[in-house]
Image (tube, rainbow, N blue to C red):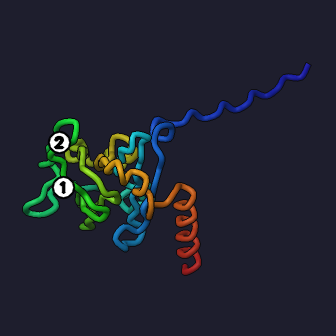
Amino acid sequence: MAIEPEAAEPAVPSLVDRYFTRWYKADVKGKPCEDHCILQHSNRICVITLAGSHPVLQSGKTIKSISYQISTNCSRLQNKVSGKFKRGAQFLTELAPLCKIYCSDGEEYTISSCVRGRLMEVNENILHKPSILQEKPSTEGYIAVVLPKFEESKSITEGLLTQKQYDEVMVKRINATTGTS
């Protein structure tokens, strides 16, 4: 009697893969490789994170600090949301800055919202421990949570890339850099 080799167990999808749809915005504000990932839940809430190709995650940079202070009069930390209709939430446009990441090599990156909606929450944990932004960008290292207007919840993905489209962009980038080398 022949012994059959055990079939490889299918990988169990992570919580993020199970409940969120990944959308990507490549080259935010025309800055090459500064890609953002938007995790959209079925209840339309969007979690803003860094895409795996973002320079902060790619090149082994050290994050010196993160600031939610956008200008002298605007701090995302002052966002106070209350009630069923989310009163007091700051309204964001697609290009609205959420935070600034300062690296030890002097580089500065501005992270944008990428979706229109109300700012529900910013991740204050990354202020105290910036390394979790690099270690767990899709989970504990998220940037912010945004709630799009109900009427716009279907249209917010216009202008964003699916996982497959984003993978194609990444292949083109790799081919462009290897072709010029």
The three-letter amino acid code for the residue at tag 2 is: Val
Label 2: which secondary element: loop
Which numbered dot is residue 124? none
Q: Position of residue 179 (x, y in %)?
A: 59, 78
State how far apart marks 1 and 2 are (Cα): 20 Å
**Quarter of the image with the N terminus in it:** top right
Label 1: which secondary element: strand
Q: Residue at x 55, y 69 (%)?
A: 174
Quick check: marks 1 and 2 in contact, CB under 8 Å? no
The three-letter amino acid code for the residue at tag 1 is: Ser
Above-or-below relation of 18 to 72: above
Q: Taking the image as drawn, is residue 135 in sight?
A: no
Q: Where is residue 14 in the image (x, y as percent from the top left)?
A: 49, 36
The residue closer to the viewer here, 28 or 116, is 116
Above-or-below relation of 95 to 124: below
Q: Residue furthest right?
A: 1
Q: Residue at x 30, y 46 (%)?
A: 145
Q: Which residue lies furthest to the left in this view?
A: 73
Q: Position of residue 43 (x, y in %)?
A: 39, 40
Q: Which residue lies furthest to the bottom in this view?
A: 180
Q: Which class describes the residues within 10 Å of circle 1: few (<14), some (14-19), or many (20+)?
A: some
Q: Nearer the viewer, mark 1 or mark 2?
A: 2
The residue closer to the viewer here, 163 or 5, is 163
The residue closer to the viewer here, 2 or 123, is 123
Residue highlighted by disc 1: 67
Q: Where is residue 113 in the image (x, y as percent from the top left)?
A: 30, 58
Q: Residue at x 74, y 30 (%)?
A: 7
Residue highlighted by disc 2: 81
**Quarter of the image with the C terminus in it:** bottom right
Number of numbered discs present?
2
Q: Taking the image as drawn, is residue 134 in sight?
A: yes
